[in-house]
């Protein structure tokens, strides 16, 4: 059977008997309502959108708490829509991979319209009409963290952005330029209110979106390419807002075993397709069951009743505290522990590492013992319960297939946040001793050991991509297991670099422990396991 409107109507009982939860609303009526009075546009039609955000709206539609759906817009790779949305009437099979082995199967039908953003296209004209409609309440985005960047690493505007700022809004070609141009449509239609909600997994995401849109508004107005007052509109929080948000849900690439399961149920054509942009897309998604979405409650034109679907609306300061709790204590540092040690100890799955007693204890000590004493408690989510879920359900989930090699990417850019804040808080405390951070010191030393590109068996491996690898690698790859080296001289430039560590570890008092661990880690093959066990026993 084909995944389409006709199938879910004509073969509903059959699909339900096979365990599928189906849309419990009239999709045609919802489509017509959405065309007449759209409320929600989403930019970035990727996996987390379909598995999480679109599913939230389906909950509202199923329960009669909404009667309009989502318009999904794609500004980077519009072929995604022709490959994975439109041939299936914009339906999607979502497989929730539970830690206890269950798979919950849902057909998501809340996306009722899909539009590309190619310049001059009918789709883009339809999007402009939507942004001129007073009914529009919010536009959310999952366009990846780099999607908000308008400058390169040297502080220069990307060529496409620079070109867009020299042209009229309607001629914009860059993704963020096209988003800014749609905001301009809303301004030109009468300074209509809207919330532009970044849901990308990066700190202060709303401010990053705001800065990008404002840069276009200022450039266009200064050059006389748009009506005067656009930049003032973007700055007016009574008319347009850029709420901060924190999103958390692991959504890996669609898995072949999930595809086979769906096809075994008789649903056809679930295979991946590769677009000319290199995107791998499929008409199904798979994701973990745990999910969090916390959004700053700043919506000048209102918002769908997402709080009824589990979304937490709160103050900006609380969103920031939730983000800090996650990235500094309760999730991201534990991921880095498993990434670095997993690569050294020969693991290729995060879930498999959680079956290793030493590694499981490592993340428990770093999370509960070393992190929780200085955790930022946001009040809306309990930090200990968050770690409980991470350790007991999320990381051990064998279905997710996440790898330490992927998580180890860009570690030099992550240490300052994932461990740096905890180290600084211990160092500044009158009651805590920074030298009690024995396992964090071990992990930092293990990362330096990782930079040698030799695993615990003495075999060479290829480290994951990292922007500082060209600078760091030559320093560490010159070290061989069993060498007698001046550890202090070797590590001094790294451990004293505040850009990497968040502080000078010699000044905070942790560097000596890191050096001692590193000396043990390079003693011989097997030293990583031996040193880890020694630290856990202390």
Image (cartoon, rainbow, N blue to C red):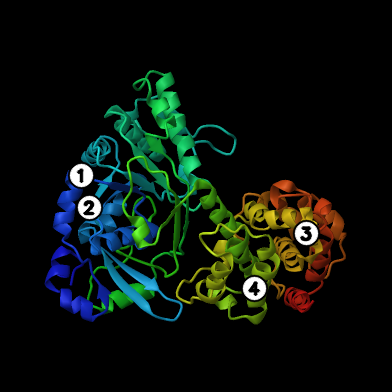
Q: In this rendering, which labeled residue sits more in front, label 4 or label 1?
A: 1
The answer to whether the residues at label 1 and label 3 have Cβ atoms under 8 Å apart is: no
- Residue 476 drawn above or below residue 402: above
Q: Mark 4 highlights which residue?
A: 364
322 and 455: which is toward the camera: 322
Answer with mark 2 or mark 4, whichever residue precedes in sequence.
2
Q: CA distance from mark 4 to mark 1?
A: 50 Å
Q: Secondary structure at mark 1?
A: loop
| Screen quadrant of the N terminus | bottom left
- Of label 4 and label 1, which has the lower sequence position? 1
Viewer-nearest of labels 3 and 2? 2
Residue ID for mark 1: 37
**Tag shown at residue 166:** none
Q: Which residue is mark 2?
A: 68
The label number, if any, that marks residue 478 in the structure image? 3
- Residue 444 quadrant: bottom right
Which residue is located at x 80 percent, y 53 percent? 508
- Of the two numbered discs 1 and 3 in the rendering, the one whose residue sits closer to the viewer: 1
Residue 160 visible in rendering: no
Q: Are marks 2 and 1 in contact (CB under 8 Å)?
A: yes
């Amino acid at each position: 059977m084909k995944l389409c409107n006709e199938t879910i109507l004509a073969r509903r009982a059959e699909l339900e008997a096979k365990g599928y939860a189906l849309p419990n609303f009239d999709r045609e009526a919802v489509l017509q309502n959405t065309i007449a009075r759209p409320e929600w546009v989403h930019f970035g039609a990727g996996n987390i959108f379909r598995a999480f955000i679109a599913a939230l709206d389906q909950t509202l539609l199923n329960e009669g708490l909404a009667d309009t759906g989502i318009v999904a817009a794609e500004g980077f790779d519009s072929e995604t829509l022709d490959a994975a949305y439109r041939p299936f009437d914009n339906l999607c099979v979502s497989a929730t991979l539970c830690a206890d082995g269950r798979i919950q199967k849902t057909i998501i039908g809340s996306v009722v319209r899909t539009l590309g953003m190619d310049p001059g296209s009918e789709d883009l004209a339809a999007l402009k009409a939507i942004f001129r409609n007073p009914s529009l309440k919010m536009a959310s985005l999952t366009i990846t963290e780099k999607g908000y960047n308008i400058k390169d690493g040297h502080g220069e505007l990307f060529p496409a952005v620079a070109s867009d700022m020299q042209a009229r809004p309607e001629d914009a070609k860059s993704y963020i330029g096209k988003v800014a141009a749609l905001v301009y449509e809303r301004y030109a239609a009468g300074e209509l209110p809207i919330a532009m909600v970044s849901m990308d997994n990066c700190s202060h995401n709303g401010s990053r979106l705001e800065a990008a849109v404002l840069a276009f508004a200022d450039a266009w107005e200064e050059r006389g390419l748009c009506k005067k007052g656009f930049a003032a509109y973007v700055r007016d929080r009574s008319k347009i807002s850029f709420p901060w948000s924190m999103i958390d849900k692991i959504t890996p690439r669609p898995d072949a075993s999930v595809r086979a399961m769906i096809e075994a149920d008789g649903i056809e054509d679930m295979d991946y397709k590769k677009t000319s942009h290199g995107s791998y897309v499929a008409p199904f998604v798979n994701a973990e069951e745990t999910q969090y979405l916390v959004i700053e409650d700043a919506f000048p034109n209102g918002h769908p009743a997402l709080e009824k679907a589990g979304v937490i609306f709160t103050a900006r300061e609380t969103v920031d505290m939730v983000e800090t709790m996650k990235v500094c204590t309760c999730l991201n540092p534990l991921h880095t522990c498993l990434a670095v040690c997993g690569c050294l100890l020969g693991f290729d799955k995060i879930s498999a590492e959680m079956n290793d007693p030493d590694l499981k204890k490592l993340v428990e000590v770093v999370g509960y013992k070393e992190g929780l004493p200085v955790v930022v408690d946001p009040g809306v989510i309990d930090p200990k319960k968050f770690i409980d879920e991470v350790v007991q359900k999320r990381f051990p989930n064998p279905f997710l297939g996440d790898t330490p090699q992927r998580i180890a990417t860009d570690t030099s850019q992550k240490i300052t946040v994932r461990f740096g804040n905890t180290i600084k808080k211990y160092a500044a405390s009158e009651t805590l001793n920074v030298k009690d951070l024995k396992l964090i010191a071990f992990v930092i030393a293990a990362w330096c050991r990782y930079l040698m590109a030799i695993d615990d068996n003495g075999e060479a491996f290829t480290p994951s991509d990292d922007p500082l690898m060209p600078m760091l690698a030559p320093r560490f790859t010159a070290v061989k297991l069993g060498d007698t080296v001046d550890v202090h001289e070797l590590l001094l430039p790294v451990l004293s670099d505040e850009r990497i560590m968040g502080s000078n570890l010699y000044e905070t008092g942790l560097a000596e422990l890191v050096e001692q661990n590193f000396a043990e880690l390079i003693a011989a093959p097997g030293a990583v396991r031996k040193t880890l066990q020694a630290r856990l026993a202390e």
